Amino acid sequence: MITLKEALAMSKDELNKFKDELQTKIEANKDLNAYIDVNTFGEGVPVAIKDNIQVKGWSVTSASKILQGYIAPYNATVIEKLLAAGLSPFGRTNMDEFAMGSTTETSCYGKTLNPVNPEHVPGGSSGGSAAAVGAGLAIAALGSDTGGSIRQPAAYCGIVGMKPTYGRVSRYGLGAYASSLDQIGPMTQNVEDAAILYDIISGSDAKDSTNAMRDDKVSDNLNPERKLTIAVLPKYIENASDDMKEAYNKAIAALKAQGHTIVEKEMMDAKYDISAYYVTATAEATTNLGRYDGIRYGNRVEGANLEETYYKTRSEGFGDEVKRRILLGNFVLSSGYYEAYYVKAQKTRHLIKEEYAKIFKDVDLILSPVAPNVAPKFGELANPMEMYLSDIYTISVNLAGLPALSLPIIKNKDGMPVGLQLIANAYDEQTLFDGSLSLE
Ligand code: GLN
């Protein structure tokens, strides 16, 4: 597959020919179920779009039954930015319903297969975007990351996935899951393409009140020669699989060989991250999903009165995982439990942020696993709790609002990709990309 950099240098005729071939290839690989459909918009370099990003005139559904029939009336800011830079949305990709999940199995369009081995999940929630890029069915894609949904599927499918600092990329037009954690980011074939796409979609936007209003760019200044100090967290790797340990050791050796300094650091037990994240994310999700009542958007199931219409629409429209999150979110926000769960989660979130800040006083980057293991096989995760626990390495980054990039390091004996992530201090995407080049 051509890279994004190459595609941006193509003539209009070459690009049109390429798009026709791409369409044929996508058709031939329909079994993968990476794409929900292959709508096109505009004439530019094609970029696949996760089904929770508004593209004017497209059906945009967050892979939920409740949004069937909804047509996006406007473009998300990231889409406007793509169009302005000569790129265009090309196909919407499958995902977990409302981005809740780690396997892309909760989509109302059925599961997506891992292109490396179809017996394995592609990861989630941006599993369709990762599978499309991994299978050579997209030059690049956009995903969204609330607790790992760009980085983890990227790691499972052997591609590059990057979550920007919270506030770098406008959330205007992104279907909200947990507003204080959500970020849109690039999913690409290599680090340089990720930097190029990050530059295109990031920047100030008055339409998102949480936007950082910063417009500094990285891709023209990429410097693989910089010597950096990189922290590793030995306690973190203790419970990871042997594959992960092998990747970890290989990455450390590669970084040292290129003149970087490795230092060992400690962070508090990551089990607290899981609790803080699932309380915060479900509380915010409950609030955000309140708008899907059958009156304003998408699908309506009529009842005898308004109350029953709400009830029927939501009962039939939401899948099991989404309902589980709504229940959990309502529980942790309800009076009597609010102090015990929600407030405690916010305090823990603060501590996590402080821990990162302390480490970043001494180092430029942190190297860590993305997931405890390679992509599981379908059916391997026995229950939702096991799925939540597989997010252990990604969610603290969202809780602290930091940028991170996941990239493939090795393949295990079965040929499954093993990915690691680098984490940088807030707004230090330049160092994140520079350091990532050393691991390619
Ligand atoms: N797996 C996590 C969850 O289900 C993260 C999802 C995401 O980043 N959107 O909440």
Image: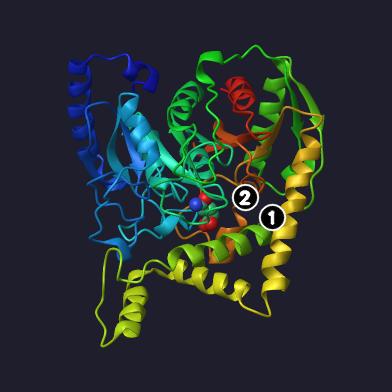
- Could you tell me which residue is drawn at 61 percent across and 14 percent down? 224
Above or below, 137 relative to 235: above
Res. 116 visible in picture: no
Q: Secondary structure at mark 2?
A: helix
Task: Give me the residue at 60% from left, 42% from top.
Answer: 370
Earlier along the polypeptide chain: callout 2 or callout 1? 1
Instruction: Report which quarter residue 55 is drawn in.
Output: top left
Q: Quadrant of the C terminus?
A: top right
Can you give x and y, in whole percent of width and height, for residue 348 in the image?
74, 57
In contact (CB < 8 Å): disc 2 and disc 1: yes
User: Horizontal and vertical percent for residue 319?
Assistant: 39, 68
Q: Which residue is mark 2?
A: 395
How would you rate the neighbour count of disc 2 (Cα within 10 Å): few for under 14, some for 14-19, many for 20 or more? many
In the displayed structure, would residue 291 be above or below residue 158? below
In front: 225, or 416?
225
Question: In front: 306, or 126?
Answer: 306
